[in-house]
């Protein structure tokens, strides 16, 4: 969403120090940015300043953490400079810190909208479902069920196991029981002795 334009000039202040393992570079960079605002999607330009310090080692395996090496008596500052600038680019760039963004209903840029810009609440994306289940129809069905008792009432899947359990008794495990005149129960199919 934001970048340094290709071919643009950079302002660079660099200090090079000769150390035991190579050359220590301390630099300050000012770069011009162009990008798209993360809130209102407008293009904008700004600038950024980055400071970094890197060691360019004389040989591989030196103390340069990122592996920057000297090429004889020369050093290529571009990879270190690019790494520092890219890591410092904002993830959500803004055209201004107080950017209001876009209207969530109509998409107009809120900075360009008239004061008090608002939309009536129409229920949003779920508004089409409001007519499918009307509250008065649901209420009427409940009253009819209460008035008629259990006639015409269908048993739900959650109620079915409880009803079977009540009919068969807790110890039946789904088998019917035969109750003799003495009140004792025995599994169906068993014989008295």
Image: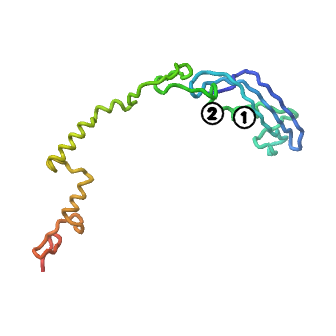
- Of mark 2 and mark 1, the one earlier in the sequence is 1
Residue 84 or residue 77, whichever sits in front:
84
Q: Residue furthest left?
A: 181
Q: Secondary structure at mark 1?
A: helix
Q: From the top left corner, tell me how far across and down residue 128 is, in percent.
A: 33, 30
Crowd rating for badge 1 (residues with CA inside 10 Å; few <14, some 14–19, many 20+): few
Crowd rating for badge 2 (residues with CA inside 10 Å; few <14, some 14–19, many 20+): few
Residue at image mark 2: 91
Q: From the top left corner, tell me how far across and down residue 29 is, in percent.
A: 78, 29
The residue depicted at 16 percent of the width and 75 percent of the height is: 184
Q: Name the mark on residue 141.
A: none
Q: Where is residue 19, by image quadrant? A: top right
Q: From the top left corner, tell me how far across and down residue 104 is, in percent.
A: 48, 27
Q: Secondary structure at mark 2?
A: loop
Structural distance between the alpha carbons of marks 2 and 1? 15 Å
Q: Quadrant of the N terminus?
A: top right
Q: From the top left corner, tell me how far across and down residue 20 is, in percent.
A: 89, 44
Residue at image mark 1: 83
Q: Residue furthest front?
A: 116
Is residue 7 positioned above or below 76 on the image? above
Is residue 20 positioned above or below 8 on the image? below
* Labels in figure, total: 2
Q: Where is residue 77, by image quadrant? A: top right
Is residue 117 positioned above or below 173 on the image? above
């Amino acid at each position: 969403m934001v970048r340094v334009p290709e071919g643009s000039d950079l302002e660079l202040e660099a200090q090079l120090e000769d150390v035991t393992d190579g050359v220590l570079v301390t630099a300050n960079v000012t770069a011009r940015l162009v990008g798209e605002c993360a809130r209102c999607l407008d293009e904008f330009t700004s600038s950024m300043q980055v400071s970094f310090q890197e060691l360019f080692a004389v040989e591989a395996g030196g103390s340069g953490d990122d592996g920057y090496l000297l090429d004889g008596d020369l050093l290529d500052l571009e990879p270190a400079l690019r790494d520092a600038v890219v890591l410092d680019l904002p993830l959500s760039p803004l055209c201004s810190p107080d950017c209001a963004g876009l209207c969530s209903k109509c998409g107009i840029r809120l900075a360009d909208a008239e004061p008090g810009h608002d939309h009536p609440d129409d229920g949003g994306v779920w508004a089409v479902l409001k007519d499918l289940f009307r509250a008065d129809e649901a209420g009427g069905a409940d009253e009819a069920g209460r008035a008629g008792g259990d006639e015409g009432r269908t048993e739900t899947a959650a109620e079915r196991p409880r009803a079977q359990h009540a009919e068969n008794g807790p110890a039946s495990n789904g088998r019917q029981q035969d109750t003799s005149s003495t009140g004792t129960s025995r599994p169906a199919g068993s014989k008295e002795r």
